[in-house]
Image (cartoon, rainbow, N blue to C red):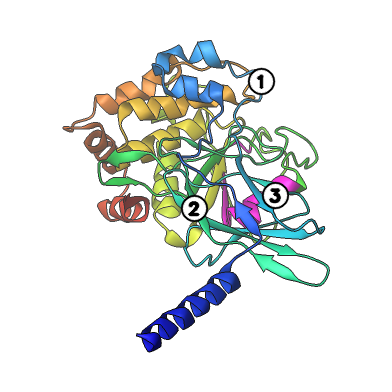
Amino acid sequence: MKNKLAKNLVLLLITGVLLSCSSTSIELKQFKEEVKIHTDLQDEFLNDNYGAIGVYASGVAELSKPKPVELSWKVKKQEKANYTVKISEDKDLNHPIIIKTSELSASVYNLKIGTKYYWNVRADYESTSDTSETETFEIESYGPRNLYVDGVTNVRDVGGWPIDETHRVKQGLFYRSGRLNTSESKTIIKEVTSEGEKVLLDDLKIKSEMDLRLVDNNEVGSITSSVLGDEVTYFSCPMDWNNSNILTHNTEMIKHIFSDILAKEENYPIIFHCNIGTDRTGLIAYLLNGLLGVSEDNLYYDYLFSNFGLIGGARTTNNIKSYVGTIKGTDGNSLSDKINNYLLSIGISSNDISAIKNLFIESI
C-alpha cells in the first residue's frame, strides 16, 4: 500500500513538473465564431438581393477593401517584449504569414475564405523568450474574397465561390483588380504602392499580369512590361470595350486568353485587370466562374461588387445583358454547359477547357 502511494506521489510530482514546463506566459485570443472579412456595408449587400446594389455602393468611393482579422494576446510578464506572430493553414505552422510587432495585437488581411488557420505568438524578452500554445480560427465561407492591395481598387480573388455542396473554385490562382499604373499616361506612373506591391509579390505570389487595356490609344499608360518587375510575366491582351457586346467583339482575344494563358498552369498566380477592373475584367471572371459552375446569382454578386470600388460610376446587370444574352442563347442544359459550348464555338479546345477546370475546381 505504501509503495503504491509512493508511486502515485511520484507520478503526481512528475506530472506537475511537465505541466509547469509546458505552461506559457502568453494567452491568445479565443475565436468562438467564424471571422468576418466583409465590412458591415458589404455584408448587408451580400445578404440582400443583388439588384439592390445601389442602396449600398455606386462606384464613386473606395469601399472595396475587406476588414482585417484582429489578433490579440495577453502576457503575464510585465517585461517589454517584441512579438512574432505566425499564421498558417498548416497545423504545424509551415509556410506561415509572419507579423512582427511590439504591441499586444496584430491585424492581418487577405486570408482565404472558408479556411481554417492556425496561429501562435513568440515573445522575445531581453534575456529570454516564450512561445504561446497554438490556437485556431476560421474565416467566413461566402464570397467574394475581397483583398487589400494598397494603391489598387476593386481587388478580389476570382476563387472561393461555391460550385456545389462538395466543390468550390480554388483560391489563390486568379485575381481581378483595377489598373496597377495610370492609364493613358505618356510616362509610366505606378499606382500600386510599395506596400501593395509587397502584398502582390510576397503574399499572393503573383507570377503573371494580364492587362486587358488597349495599346493603340495608349490606354496601357506606356508600359510594355509589368510594373511589378521583370520577374512577372506580362500578357498584353487588349480588348475593346466601347461597343454593344464586348463578348462577340473580342472573340479572338478571349480565345487567346483561355487557350494560351488560363489553360497553362505555369502562368499562375495571375493578376488581371482592365482600367477599373469592372467590365472587360468582369467578362473574363463571368466566363470562367460560369464555366466552372458558379451560380448565376453569385456571378451577378461578383460583378456588382465592383460598385464598392472607385470605378467612376455605378454598374447594374443592364451593363452586361448583351453578353449574358449571347451566352443564354447558346445551346446547353445549364449556364456552365452554355459557356462551355460557346467557348468551343470560338475555337477553344475541349482539352484546354478540361485543363482550366482541373486547375480551378477543388473539393471542399
Report the residue marked by disc 1: 61
Q: Nearer the viewer, residue 140 or 18?
A: 18
- The spot of residue 51 in percent (x, y) is 41, 14
Residue at image position (44%, 29%) is 302
Q: Is residue 192 left or right of residue 264?
A: right
Q: Are marks 2 and 1 in contact (CB under 8 Å)?
A: no
Count neighbours of disc 1 (C-alpha within 10 A) and say few if under 14, some if 14 to 19, many if 20 or more.
some
The quarter of the rendered structure image containing the N terminus is: bottom left
Residue 351, position as x, y percentages in the image: 28, 56
How would you rate the neighbour count of disc 3 (Cα within 10 Å): few for under 14, some for 14-19, many for 20 or more? many
Q: In this view, does 229 lie to the left or right of 342?
A: right
Mark 2 surroundings: few (<14), some (14-19) or many (≥20) residues within 10 A? some
Magenta residues, as a range? 195-215
Mark 2 vs mark 1, CA separation in Å: 34 Å
Name the residue type under label 2: Thr
Look at the numbered disc 2 and give the secondary structure of its residue: strand
Residue 141 rendering spot, x and y as whole percentages: 41, 39
User: Which corner quadrant of the image does residue 245 belong to?
Assistant: top left
Residue in the foreground of this view, choosing between 157 and 108: 108
Residue 289: quarter of image: top left
363 over 12 or under it: above or below: above
**Which of the two discs, 1 and 3, labels the residue nearer the N terminus?**
1
Magenta stretch holds residue 204: yes
Question: For mark 2, what is the residue?
Answer: 136
**Secondary structure under the numbered disc 1 in the rendered image:** loop
Task: Say which element carries label 3.
Answer: helix
**Towards the viewer: 63 or 257:** 63
Q: Is residue 81 visible?
A: yes
Vertical placement of residue 347 versus 18, above or below = above
User: Mark 3 — residue?
Assistant: 197
**Residue visible at 45% across and 46% down in the picture:** 257
